[in-house]
Amino acid sequence: MLYPSIDKLLTIVDSKYKLVHVASIRSKEMLEHHHYQLPEEEYTNKRTIGRALEELEKGLITVVSESDHE
């Protein structure tokens, strides 16, 4: 079973496409800058994409929709 579950993540982000987009951006940031929001031993996943999803699930990443900007 994957952690975190997609069902839990979709309560935070309103679409699978936005979820993939946000996670890929954060994953690339981790690879480029080696900046993690948690100590590395606290992550369950070893890959940055999984770690990005964990950060999203723990509320460390805020997703802002376009309607929030208006």
Image (tube, rainbow, N blue to C red):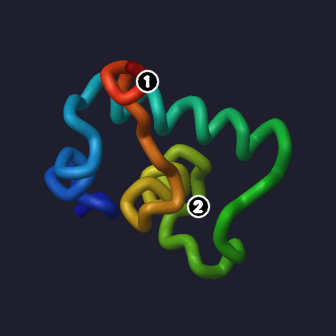
The residue beneath circle 1 is 69
Query: Is 30 placed above or below 4 here?
Result: above
**67 to the left or right of 37:** left
Q: CA distance from mark 2 to mark 1?
A: 34 Å
Relative horizontal placement of residue 60, taking residue 64 as reference (left or right): right
**2 and 1 marks in contact (CB < 8 Å):** no
Q: Secondary structure at mark 2?
A: loop
Q: At numbered mark 1, what does the secondary structure look like: helix, strand or loop?
A: helix
Image quadrant containing the N terminus: bottom left
- Up-down: is 53 above or below 44? above
Residue that appears at 60% across and 40% down: 26
Tell me if 26 is positioned left or right of 15 in this view.
right
Furthest-bottom residue in this view: 41
The residue lying at 21 percent from left, 35 percent from top is 14
Mark 2 neighbour class, 10 Å CA radius: few under 14, some 14 to 19, many 20 or more: few
- Name above or below for residue 3 compared with residue 67: below
Q: Position of residue 3 (x, y in %)?
A: 33, 63
Query: Where residue 29 appears, x then y in whole percent?
Result: 72, 38
**Amino acid type, label 1:** His
**Horizontal relation, residue 15 to residue 59: left or right:** left
Q: Amino acid at mark 2?
A: Lys
Relative to 30, say whether 24 is above or below.
above
The residue labelled by disc 2 is 46
Of labels 2 and 1, earlier in sequence is 2
Q: Which quadrant does the C terminus fall into?
A: top left
59 vs 36, nearest the viewer: 59
Q: Hey, which quadrant is residue 37 in on the image?
A: bottom right
Q: Which residue is at 70% across, 76% downward?
A: 39
Q: Residue placed at 37% from the left, 60% from the top?
A: 57
| Residue 26 tag number | none
Where residue 21 sits in the image (x, y, percent)? Answer: 44, 26
Question: How far across and how far down the image is residue 34, in percent?
Answer: 82, 51
